[in-house]
Amino acid sequence: MRLVQVLIPEGTRDSVLAALDEQGIDYAVFEEVGRGDFEAMVQFPVPPSGVETVLERLTAAGVRDDAYTIVLPTETVVSERLSALVERFPGLRISREELYARAQDLAPANSTFFAFLILSTIIATTGLLLDSAATIIGAMVVAPLMGPAISASVGTVLDEPKMASRGVKLQVTGLLAAIATAAIMGWLMQQTILIAPGLDIRTIPQVAERTGPNFLSLFLALGSGLAGSISIMRGSGSTLVGVAIAVALVPPAATSGLGIAFGLPGVAVAAAILVLVNLLAINLSALILFYLSGFKPLEAGTFEGVRASVFSRVVVIAVAIAVLSIVLGGVTWTTFQTQSFEQQTEAELREVFDEADVGGVELVSVGVDYEPVDILLGNEPQVDVLVGIPRDLEAPPDLAQRFDDDLTERLGRDVVVRVGFIETQVSEREDPTPPFGGQAPASGEPTSRDYARGAPT
């Protein structure tokens, strides 16, 4: 419920009160004793979804834009008349005036925005290098990216070009600042003992997660934008909702900066593409939802122009996402192909090993080294096989080639097979205490499975 207070301009008292009577609004009128421009103040309760309709009627009745209209949230209203008001104004969304005010409050001052964003990036970069998901999530609580994303869409729908422009600028410059911050931090940390020499950040799971973007990342961004928009227009905004938006933007931006710092252009470009796709998807989902919810410009007569502006922006963003989705689709397809190939190869090799019937040789493990980039570069998959062989048995000299020939025939493509051997010793018993009074093993006899030195061929 909202409590609305309106200062009635001179000469419009009767028309304003008549408009409230037409809407069935209960009100209280107070004589105005301040400036002479107003003759009274009227105060009335109304559900959030009815504020916009009532204010439109009051504007038509003579309440000008230069008058004072205050909309206050109320904690509790006790009245049997509330049910009639709720029935008259069903719905959950807030008024466009309240939406505009919320969007202004969400976009902080530039100094505050960049201070929090840089601190969030520093924490997120640390979390990436530590491979700590908890640290990364903690950094998202600090990131102030929800405000600019929402204000850009609200400014477009309400025909407030300054608000929309500032929201877009803050998002773009903020993410560029995040990438630069992570790059500088990564370079500085390489000059210290905090990072091991020769560290390959591509082997860190939290970093690798942001360097292989696919369509699932797009769903994350779309969902984040919708969640942020719903929380604002229904008056239930929470900083926790902003965490979802920040998760889609800050960690990949930090990953891109680390790619620059460590001289890995592939990491930098892949993470930057993920940032751009997520940014576009968040803005697209928020813009469409606000428009479909029926929000119109604060000034009457500009709705047609806003409709054309919203349509053109939606088309541009959708086309950009479609183009970038080619990259996402390629990554998704190649990832699926490599994972399917790895599973098939492992199953086929185990079957080949069983059919080979190599006496005394035990299959220990199978690994397939095949990445999405190998598909693009045309590199052959590499299959690593580790087998155990007794000390007194000579390693089969042609085992790798036999595996290679069989896999090539079964898979229909060339592969590279490497076989590594480890010497094994297996005792007859593991318990040194003999049963039924027997003698214990002599000193030096093996009493457990022993894996000795390896010798790849």
Image (cartoon, rainbow, N blue to C red):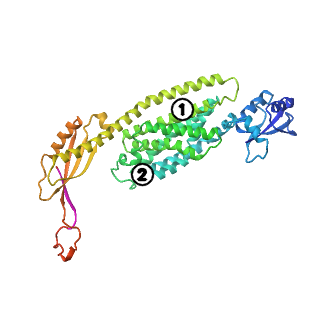
Instruction: Indicate the quadrant where residue 58 lies.
Output: top right
Residue 455 sits inside the magenta stretch: yes
340 vs 312, left or right, is left
Q: CA distance from mark 1 to mark 2?
A: 31 Å
Point out residue 454 in the picture as x, y percentages from the top left corner.
19, 55
Q: Decide: marks 1, 2 in contact (CB < 8 A)?
A: no
Q: Earlier in the sequence, mark 1 or mark 2?
A: 2
Q: Which residue is mark 2?
A: 131
Magenta span: helix, strand or loop, mainly? Answer: strand
Instruction: Indicate the quadrant where residue 114 lies.
Output: top right
Are there few (<14), some (14-19), or many (20+) residues within 10 Å of tag 1? many
Front residue of 40/177: it is 40
Are there few (<14), some (14-19), or many (20+) residues within 10 Å of tag 2? some
Point out residue 62 in the picture as x, y percentages from the top left corner.
81, 28
Q: Which residues are magenta?
A: 447-456
Instruction: Indicate the quadrant where residue 392 lies.
Output: bottom left
| Residue drawn where x is 65% and y is 31% of the image | 295
Above or below: residue 238 compared with residue 19: below
Res 165 visible: no
Q: Secondary structure at mark 2?
A: loop
Point out residue 204 in the picture as x, y percentages from the top left corner.
38, 49
| Residue drawn where x is 55% and y is 41% of the image | 145
**Which amino acid lies under the numbered mark 2 shown in the image of this protein?**
Asp
| Residue drawn where x is 78% and y is 36% of the image | 68
**Which amino acid lies under the numbered mark 1 shown in the image of this protein?**
Leu
Residue 379 sits inside the magenta stretch: no
Q: Secondary structure at mark 1?
A: helix
Res 94 visible: yes
The disc at residue 410 is none
Q: Which residue is mark 1?
A: 284
Front residue of 107/86: it is 86
